[in-house]
Image (cartoon, rainbow, N blue to C red):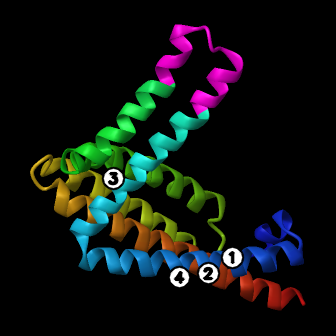
Amino acid sequence: MTSIRMFFDTETLQKFSTHTIIAGILMMIVGGVGVFAPTIMSLVVVTLLGWLFITSAIIQGYITYKSYKRSFSAWLKPILSFITGMLFFIFPVEGVAVAAVMLSVYLLVDAFSSFGFAMDYKPHKWWWMHIVNALISIVLAVLIMTGWPVSSLLWVGIYAAISLFFDGVALFSIGVAAKKLTKETN
């Protein structure tokens, strides 16, 4: 507990705890709903990816127009980003298969991050929740790839929802512990 006090003053810790609890609850709600509507959750994931690529293309295109408008190679990235985003919208089911691979990679990176976070805060009462989150992320990444691409439409939504739910649980537990720490400090 004392190690977290070294990183934050009481006011920052209070804000952190409140925002972390709210974010954790919202993530648990979205994850819980996604488990019961996995196909919709899969299509939401693909739609968000499509919008991310389109938004990225617009920003990259603007920067290219302002800075490198005569360079053909500078225009390749915004054009490819735009085409990729549009392909997610035009072919959403195939986009879910692509999203399955991307989600597996994300879950593996998430697991690595959660292990690191757990080791950084190991004396903390809830540090083990991040280990659990990391192990679940690894299992989910492996399961996604074993049924790929046939089961992608169903499992991308379920796995995204489960990952969101457990990330929410981990955030919520850290927020509650931080709130208790601020009460002890006052």
Please indicate, yes or no, whether residue 4 appears anywhere in the rendered image. yes
Q: Residue at x 84, y 72 (%)?
A: 12
Q: Secondary structure at mark 2?
A: helix
Q: CA distance from mark 2 to mark 3?
A: 25 Å
Q: Secondary structure at mark 1?
A: helix
Which secondary structure type mostly characterizes the magenta part of the structure? helix
What residue is pinned by disc 3?
46
Q: State if disc 4 and disc 2 touch (CB < 8 Å).
A: yes
Magenta stretch in the rendered image = 60-77
Q: Residue 132 location in percent, x, y? A: 42, 68
Q: State if disc 4 and disc 1 touch (CB < 8 Å).
A: no
Q: Which numbered circle lies on residue 25?
A: 4
Q: State if disc 3 and disc 4 touch (CB < 8 Å).
A: no
What residue is pinned by disc 2?
22
Closer to the chain start, of discs 4 and 3, is 4
On screen, residue 83 above or below 123: above
Q: Residue 140 location in percent, x, y? A: 28, 59
Amino acid marked by disc 1 = His
Q: State if disc 1 and disc 2 touch (CB < 8 Å).
A: yes
Q: Is residue 29 magenta?
A: no
On the picture, is 183 further left or further right than 17?
A: right
On the picture, is 149 further left or further right than 139?
A: left
User: For the view shown, which residue lies furthest in the left direction?
Assistant: 150
Q: Tell us which disc is closer to us: 2 or 3.
A: 3
